[in-house]
Amino acid sequence: MIQTVLIVIVIIILLTIIMFVLLKKIVKLINEQSKLFFVMKLQSYDELIDEKEKKLEKLENKEKEEILKKEELDIESINVVIPQESPKYEIEGLVEVIKKIEKEFNYDSKKIVLYYVELSKREDLFYYNNLLEIKNKLDQYGLFNIITKDENKQNKIFESLGITNTRIFSLYKFNYNTLNINNFMKVLQNEIKKNDPTIYVYVGDETENYNEIANNVKTCFEKTIIKGIKVKYKNILYEYSLS
């Protein structure tokens, strides 16, 4: 009885093993078939894509040919006229204008500067030097030390510095009733500019320089000057230029 049971068990085990092996082979076969099917599908898709691209390329080439033909026709329809001679453009009276400019601004710049140098030599610099002396005294004393004082003390400081009996102080008192250091400094600076003996020569050419003519000549470049010079003397500007 026992032997029969064992034989049955062995047979079942063998059948199970056989079934497992067969099942494994079937799965492998199905897997290979699936892969083959997928590859074939991809290949067919590639062929379809290639076919589509070829058709599109043919259409594009055809369109390009049509566009080129149309452009050729358009070009042929245009009438091109080439002038035999280039046109001459003239501004009426231009030559006369140039001649007039040359005549009006044909100055001897060096002679002009020399004129102001000679003029400055005849000027009395006493008043100008006195103005500089007063400014120097106030700077040395310290403007802050004066501003912080009341009017009476400011007057005493001016008296001690010898300013109250000067020409500039009389000019200031003529315009202002009370002493205010800020107002006085404005009048002083203005008078210094008005009496400055420096001759400022403005030129449009950076290579042009007149400083060697005299010690009080200062050449300044001004890019707006086209021709000639400008002279600033005693805070007055004299024009000898075209700008």
Image (spheres, rainbow, N blue to C red):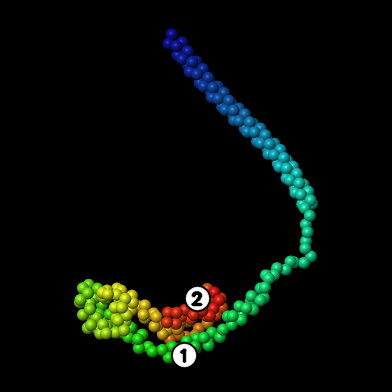
**Label number found at residue 118:** 1
| Earlier residue among tags 1 and 2 | 1
Residue closer to the observer: 130 or 223: 130
Which image quarter is the C terminus in?
A: bottom right
Count residues near mark 1 (Cα–Cα under 10 Å), then give few for <14, some for 14-19, many for 20+. Answer: few
Residue closer to the observer: 103 or 17: 103
Residue closer to the observer: 149 or 45: 149
Query: Percent x, y for residue 104?
Result: 59, 80
Q: Amino acid at mark 1?
A: Glu
Q: Vertical placement of 80 versus 198: above or below?
A: above
Question: In the image, what residue occupies the spot 77% across and 63% down?
Answer: 83
Query: Percent x, y for residue 212?
Result: 48, 88
**Residue 164: quarter of image:** bottom left
For this orientation, the residue located farthest to the top is 1
Residue beneath label 2, please?
A: 222
Question: What whole-number distance in Å separates the C-alpha atoms at marks 1 and 2?
Answer: 24 Å
> Callout 1: helix, strand or loop?
helix
> Callout 2: helix, strand or loop?
loop
Which image quarter is the N terminus in?
A: top left
Q: Vertical placement of 12 versus 156: above or below?
A: above
